[in-house]
Amino acid sequence: MQLKEACERLGKIAILRSLTQPELEALAVDRTWTTVRPGQVVVSHLSKERNIYFISEGVFQVGLVTAAGRPVAFRKLQPGSHFGELAART
């Protein structure tokens, strides 16, 4: 993906909208862009990974399934949303 397109996509993410163009460019460099198939699990419950995901297209369904297989706590994330680890840096 070209830097310009990556910056345009990142600029539409709600928590990144206040970034300047140079800041978006710095963030866009060496990012991994992934296409997710419908029904594909991106992050499992209690995962130890430390990634943050920005949704630039499509809708993600987030939820948990009980040990008995009953779905609970569902919500949908729209383009411009994010999910995953977002630790504060000092």
Image (spheres, grey):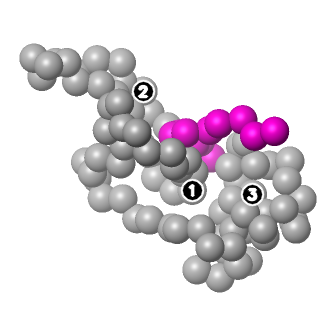
The CA distance from mark 1 to mark 2 is 17 Å
Q: Quadrant of the C terminus?
A: top right
Q: Secondary structure at mark 1?
A: loop
The CA distance from mark 2 to mark 3 is 24 Å
Label tally: 3
Q: Which quadrant would residue 11 be assigned to in this image?
A: bottom right
Which residue is label 3 attached to? Answer: 11
The 10 Å Cα crowd at callout 1, few under 14, some 14 to 19, many 20 or more, is some
Residue 56: mark: 1
Q: Residue at x 36, y 24 (%)?
A: 74
The image shows residue 20 at horizontal and vertical percentages of: 89, 59
Q: Which quadrant would residue 86 be assigned to in this image?
A: top right
The image shows residue 6 at horizontal and vertical percentages of: 66, 70
Q: Amino acid at mark 1?
A: Ser
Assess whether residue 64 is covered by the magenta stretch: no
The CA distance from mark 3 to mark 1 is 10 Å
Compared to residue 4, the image places residue 36 above or below, namely above
The image shows residue 17 at horizontal and vertical percentages of: 80, 49
The image shows residue 63 at horizontal and vertical percentages of: 34, 28
Q: Residue at x 51, y 45 (%)?
A: 50
Residue 26 in sight: yes
The 10 Å Cα crowd at callout 2, few under 14, some 14 to 19, many 20 or more, is few
Furthest-left residue in this view? 68
Question: Who is closer to the viewer here, 30 or 48?
Answer: 48
Q: Amino acid at mark 2?
A: Arg
